Amino acid sequence: MIHIENLTKEYDLSGKRGQVLAADRLTFDIPAGEIFGLVGPNGAGKTTTLKMLCGLLMPTGGRVTVNGIDVERQPEAAQKHIGYLADFFSVYDDLKAWEYLDYFGHAYKMDSAAIPARVTEVIGLMGLESKRDAFIGGLSRGMKQRLGIARAILHDPPVLVLDEPASGLDPKARHELKLLIKNLHRTGKTIFITSHVLSDLEEICTSIGILEKGRLMRLGSLDQILRGDSAATGPAPRRLRIKLAAAGFALGDWLAAQPGVTGVTLEPATPAGGAPVPATGAIFHLAGSESQIADLVRALVTAGAPVCGVEEITESLEQLFFRISSGEVM
Amino acid sequence: MNLLANPELRRNYRSQMRPGRTIATAAIIAALSLSYGYAVYKEGEGTTPEGEWGQQLFATAFWIQVVALAIGGGFACLVAISREKEQNTFDFQRVTRLTPLELALGKLFGAPALSYFVTLCLIPVALIGAVVGRMNFGLILAAYAVLFITVAAWHGLALLVSLLMERNAASAGGLFYLVLIGMASLPDNGPLGLGMMSPFYAGSMLSAQAAEATAANPIIYGSRHWDSFFGLSMPHGVALAVLSAIFLAWILLALSRNIKRDPAVYELYSPEQSLGLALYMNLVMVGFFEWKDFTGHDAHHLMTFVNLSLFFALGLTVMRNRDRLRRRINELGDRASGWLASFWPATYVLGGFLAVGLGILVVIGIRYGDGNWNTGAAVVSLVLSGFWLARDILFVQFMNLTRVRRPLTMAILYLVIYYTCAGIVFGTLAMFNPSRAPFAAIFLPSLGLTLEPRNWEAHSVAWILAVAAQIPLLFVLAMMQKQKLAELSERPEPTVAAPVSAD
């Protein structure tokens, strides 16, 4: 649905402070029906990337296609397929809510006869029925944001590009926004979203990209990213924890003898200088698929270990994001 | 394309013409019209010829309409895009499927909605005045036609200023437009005869008619109300309307080329379109030129000067900035940073200027060939002026590639400072007398612009040296630009991350 190829944008910093790469040869695809979340600190290049995707900024190099249409060469044709919401609340305060949507309906060259019904439909979808005839200037921030989303989906584009849609919203409005995005996803929309609220993205996105100084540091499904899978080395070893109901089984020795197992750490850990504590669990890495995990657990039980728990240990997106932002991992 | 169905036009009318505001505006204008009409009627009763108060009433109503449209509407256009940029609503319009021309037309005729409404409200009182004053309705219609066409052209100019001005420079652009329109509104057509090219001329048309009405000869104006285009006489109003309509077409071309573009890569016209504009402007200039008032060299100097200004302005429109060059280098590789590229846009403006200048030279040569006309002096004057133009435009282009804030403003400022200082120093050293002028012309090529045949005949070699001396200067400036191109060609280190595919 969205194809981004070698997308590059160089900027000059004001004064003589040099130049910056807001997007550094970004290359990736977003298949139809995905909710793709682009995360990164301020200045990472998220908004620049989104604006290039919408044809608002000309890239220094590379290209973007939406539904097979080159955004730079045929911007108006591509924009038919895109609904865009910026990271600021910008609406015409001197128009009424329905007038605002009616204007954009015509500007998107929708069928004139179908516009009133569609306006009513999206107003209902956004829960703005009571504000239909209200001047936009008098609406709350949350209402304006809903109106912005209504505008973005008015012409029923297959792709929605949402730049920080939750910024400035209270927790309730944020929750409603999340539900709304999930609903839009259910209708088959491909959604490209940026947000600072990583927990929200974690909850709704089917794939994630982490951008840092214009570079795409991670890209993939949430699971792939959190496990640290990479194209060069393949799937990363999984980090697992096994708990035993009682001590007495030589868990450390047994695990160390298994193929694909590395980095075994027994729990509870032996205190420094103290007497050894009998192990009732272990954390280790296993290079393998989920069926190999199942095989390992089955073998452990067969060997007589009183297994009472197995879990995969993953980082949260927020933890990973901070580690990348701080340069701890590349 | 149905203009009335234009969404941007309708949005403007919708937001500006709310019922409350519309009724209030109409009521205020009606009240003012009635009271003013009554006052004029009472004042003229028994003291002025019958019906003259009607002419006065019409003149006042028409004048208010001109001011409402030219100044009120102009100001509305002036902020039409810059305000949207400030409010961040412009990007949403740019991502709609409105074509650039639709968006431009919607703003051009929509932004001044209130001014048009005020004009409409004043029509009844103007009509009453015209009927009572027994005015020539044909002329009134002509005046309104001239008014609306010139106003549209000036509104287009305001809209273009609004598009091009950066956020924090919008007020400077506004000031520029208001000064222009203010000068045009001054009595006697203002400085540079700007009034003759503005909506205010429509008022002059009717003033002339009013003055002549008693002589029952309403369409005969003074000689300044007639123009001659290649010998074809026509009323100035007709010429103004046609020229304004063509001017508006050029402005719409610039607007529709740029209104939906990324502001970092605005380019008013393509090089071909710029050349077309230059040729058109020259056609107008030569066509309307009043040859009988000038000697051959005076005519040549004047036209060369006008072309210099014109090509300098065109050079600015095709200038490349760092962003555009990065894209070119990315697309074309070394070709975009080679020697030929380092001379841009000097090659373009010099070629165009010399081609157009030689054409004019041939026209003047034919017309004045047997009089006090020296082709050699004219050619040297033209070539030196061309090199001057190329030199300055190269400097401005170089500055445009530096990282200073407002590079174009800084470049123009440096040029002004340079020419002011050089003028003072050379003046003090008496370098402007005929024998030394060619040497001063190396640094101040503007001296070539007024080269007289006697001076040329007395110091031909020195003048040719002055022309030749410009060539190494051009190379120095091109080399400076080449360094900037090399700097922009440097690419950062490749990305180290190796992302996995999302699928």
Image (cartoon, grey):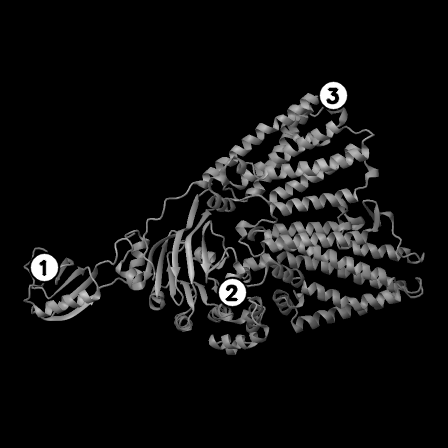
Which of the two residues, B300 or B283, is positioned nearer the viewer here? B283
**Figure quadrant of residue A231:** bottom left
Q: Viewed as shown, does residue B434 lie left or right of B469?
A: right
The residue that disc 3 covers is B458
The residue that disc 2 covers is A80
Taking the spot 53% from the left edge, 77% from the top edge, the residue there is: A120
Find residue B319 and report its horizontal and vertical position in percent.
57, 43
What is the secondary structure assignment of the residue under circle 1? loop
Taking the spot 52% from the left edge, 58% from the top edge, the residue there is: A74
Which of the two residues, B231 or B14, is positioned nearer the viewer here? B231
Whether labels 3 and 1 belong to a single chain: the reply is no
Q: Amino acid at mark 2?
A: Lys
Residue B57 drawn above or below residue B434: below
The residue that disc 1 covers is A257
Find residue B240 and report its horizontal and vertical position in percent.
77, 52
What is the secondary structure assignment of the residue under circle 3? helix
Whether labels 1 and 2 belong to a single chain: the reply is yes
Q: Viewed as shown, does residue A110 lie left or right of A263?
A: right
In space, the residues marked 3 and 2 are separated at their CA atoms by 70 Å
Q: For the residues carrying marks 3 and 1, which lies nearer the camera in this image?
A: 1
Which of the two residues, B89 or A237, is positioned nearer the viewer here? A237
Number of marks in the rendered image: 3
Q: Amino acid at mark 1?
A: Ala
Q: Viewed as shown, does residue A195 lie left or right of A323?
A: right
In space, the residues marked 3 and 1 are separated at their CA atoms by 106 Å
Q: Amino acid at mark 3?
A: Ala
In space, the residues marked 1 and 2 are separated at their CA atoms by 60 Å
Q: Chain of mark 2?
A: A
Q: On the rendered image, what quadrant is the N terminus of chain A found in?
A: bottom left
Q: For the residues carrying marks 3 and 2, which lies nearer the camera in this image?
A: 2
